Image (cartoon, coloured by chain):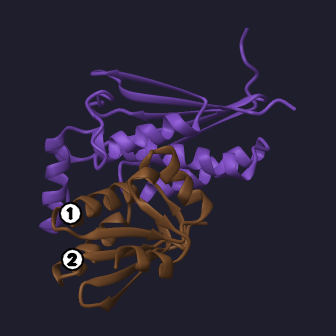
Amino acid sequence: MTTPLKIESRIESRDTAVLGLAGEVDVANVAQVREAALELLARGVKRLVVDLSATEYMDSSGLGTLVGLLKRLKETGGEIAIAGARPRVRRLFEITGLKQVFALHDDVAAALKEVC
Amino acid sequence: MERVVLGQVELRIPRQAEFVRVARMTACALAAQLDFTYDVVKDIELAVAEACTNAIEHGVPRAAAQAARAASDAGRSLAAEERYDEIVVRFITHPEQLAVEVIDRGQGFDPEELGADEEAVGGLGLMVIRQVMDEVHIECTAEAGTCVRMIKHRARE
């Protein structure tokens, strides 16, 4: 069975936030992820940690959204870091070469250190 | 020499994102039957999802996709001439491999045109499919649409 997506966003400080994605990110629900992230950016967030520690499945639609966020944040001098990706999701970054583009960290604390 | 076919399963799913999960679950069930390892089962699941997503995103003319969105935004049903086609996902199990065909009977897409833009899901999706499957063949014709044929071999013991 597939697991429904749960999105949690948390403002850490004035321009820093953590976006947690639990469950499965796929083509059917990726628009919700994009919407939640853009809402944070609209609130002035420039440093974003995407917590994938509870993400059980992600495909290229999720990855494409993260690439879009990376581009937007870089344009405004912001940062994005990935935290806690499980082996299957980490593999997706590896086989697409995006492991070299995104900073992958073991947990949210390490990712926050990177972006702040 | 013809390959021995253990079984063939054909799904016809509406061209809607929500139904990609049905294809994913079927892929997992059939791959597990062939005793692929967990990681390979998950790779096959991913490849099937990517091929179905490409068929949804690129398999119909842009105008048809826009018409569907406009109808959805306006809260109305699609007129008959605007209706999306279906996607056929065919799984063929052999003793030594699993073959999956994702057939989009819409307009078809040109894999070269999906380009290398990282944000373009189609380009990333094809990259994923090519990385996780052993063989990938793509045939596009204006008449028959697009067929993405993917094969995963069972590891020899």
Quarter-of-image position of residue B74: bottom left
- Residue picked out by circle 1: A72
At 28% across and 35% down in the image, what residue appears? Answer: B114
Foreground residue among B51 and A70: A70
At 58% across and 49% down in the image, what residue appears? Answer: B45
Q: Which mark is residue A41?
A: 2
Count of numbered badges drawn on the protein: 2
Q: Quadrant of the N terminus of chain B?
A: top right
Look at the image and tell me whether residue B55 can be seen: no
Foreground residue among A67 and A47: A47
Residue A31 shown left or right of residue B75 in the figure: right
Residue sticking out furthest to the top = B1
Residue B22 shown left or right of residue B126 in the figure: right
Chain at numbered mark 2: A
Residue A73, image x, y percentages: 23, 67
- Residues under numbered marks 2 and 1 in contact, where contact means CB atoms less than 8 Å apart: yes
At 48% across and 48% down in the image, what residue appears? Answer: B49
Chain at numbered mark 1: A
Q: Quadrant of the C terminus of chain B?
A: top right
Look at the image and tell me whether residue B97 can be seen: yes
Foreground residue among B16 and A45: A45
Answer few, some or many: residues within 10 Å of disc 2's Cα (few below 14, many 20 plus, some between 14 and 19).
Answer: many
Specify the amino acid type for callout 2.
Leu
Q: Is residue B135 above or below residue B24?
A: above
Q: Which chain is displayed in brown in the rendered image?
A: A
Q: Which mark is residue A19?
A: none
Label 1 secondary element: helix
Residue A11, image x, y percentages: 32, 89
Identify the hue of chain B: purple
Q: Is residue B147 above or below residue B2?
A: below
